[in-house]
Image (cartoon, rainbow, N blue to C red):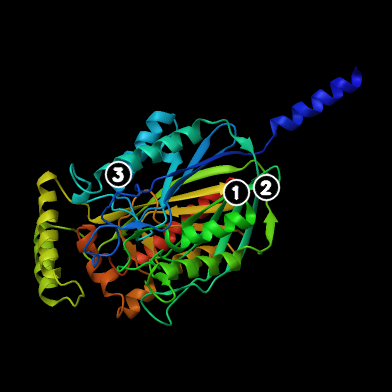
Amino acid sequence: MKRVWILLLLLSVLSCNKGGLTMSYHSADISTTEDEHVVLAGFAARDTLSDGIHQHLYTHCLVLGDGTQKVCIISNDLMEISPAISDTIRTMIAEQSGLALDNILMHNIHTHSAPRSGGASNYTGGTNRAWKERMVATVVGNAVKTIGEKGKPFALEVGKGETLINGNRCEKEGPVDHNVYVARFLQHGKPVVSIVNLACHPVCMGPGSYLLSSDYAGVNARYLSEAWGGEVFQLTGAAGNMDPALGPKRVDYAEQCGKELSDALKDIPFEKVSSKGILRLVNDTVDLPYQIAEVTPEAVTRHADSLAATARTTFPRFADDVMNWKDEILERFDNGPVPSKLRYHLHGLDVDGIVFFFSDGEPFCEYQMEARAAFPDRTVFFAGYTNGQNSYLPSEHAYEVRKGYEYEIEQMHVYIKAPYPLSERMPSTYREGVIRTIRETLESE
């Protein structure tokens, strides 16, 4: 009898996973139907609707808990969701699950072969309307289900590889980050889900492709899932200036790059992460300066007139686009002052000493490299495109070179509807915010 009680006590201790973290994970399909044709996002040169599916699109939800709190990480195989739509979806998840809004991080891998989630095609009667309604319901439902589950203990391991599938999309010899970070979450010794973190636009399938696809990221996930078991999803890194090395092409290039990436990763060594029971989330903001100290109607008008008359651009309707931008920005002043800085949201998550950093927008790869260099004894995952897509973030190098970066520095504000171009002082402000957020994330240790 004494032996029975000892055995029961031992089992009780083990089942409590004292000091350890727990996880829940689910994914769900957010593709179009086979006979549904939609406007694809990402390339203005496309002039017709989608005509098939190469890789199905998924929403992935990983929920981590420490017994007192949960953090929800979502990665969608989509190009981008505006901050407003992102806030709406996250609010729906928060209200239906009871999880705090700040504890929900929603990333998009930025594939340019996913349906548009904004614009006229999503209005009533538009080609994308029915898909968008299903997509939102699926993303919300998958997250609410995952949050509501009782988490189970897991083991975490991390690895690092290198790939040559990516290159600088603006300069042949420009900055590039070939590093790939992988986190694997295991239960009973087997991967449940693996996260791949790479700085590279998923644009192997260029404007001549009308297939729905998660691009190289989905191809890589397919191969790694076969090799490792479990599911695989991507957190796209600081990819503002990172493209596939040969630029956008067709579906066979997505297959090639995805296979090359999986071959580079499938045999990398992994290091087991010691279970410490650490789960710390830090939410921060940084206000990025525009080229002028105060945005006024007069300044917007002067800038629009000058830009329309002098800018070099590949967009044939650029002058008209500038005037439309001016009209929209001026309308905002009817509702009160327009902010004279662009607020960015930064998030740091410490999972047993491994750092996951999230930012909205499209940072250039230098920020990712600088963040990792600032914490050389840490593994730092860096994800852009989180909780809304609102701007490129060119690096100091881009502002110095300028040629090749004209769109990102001088013109993108027209298309993202920012009230003014960002200042060349922006890189140092953003970098300081990134480093500060990561440092604060690690302070609890």
- In the rendered view, tell whether residue 216 sits above or below residue 90: below
Distance CA(mark 2)–CA(mark 1): 8 Å
Label 2 residue SS: strand
In the image, residue 245 above or below residue 384:
below
The residue under label 1 is 230
In this rendering, the answer to whether 341 lies above or below 68 is below
Specify the amino acid type for callout 1.
Answer: Gly
Residue 209 pos. (x, y %): 33, 65
Lateral position of residue 302 relative to residue 199, left or right: left
- Residue at 26% across, 71% down: 407
User: Which residue occupies the extreme front position in the image?
Assistant: 35
Residue for point 45% across, 65% down? 367
Of residues 407 and 376, the one nearer the viewer is: 407
Give whichever of 294, 301 is nearer the camera: 301
Residue most extreme to the top: 1
Is the residue marked by circle 1 packed among few (<14), some (14-19), or many (20+) residues within 10 Å?
A: some
Q: Is residue 435 visible?
A: no
- Amino acid type assigned to the residue bearing label 2 in the image: Lys
Compared across the picture, whether 193 is left or right of 121 comes to right
Instruction: Choose the circle earlier in sequence order: 2 or 3.
Output: 3
Please name the residue that numbered disc 3 is placed on.
132
Q: CA distance from mark 2 to mark 3?
A: 35 Å
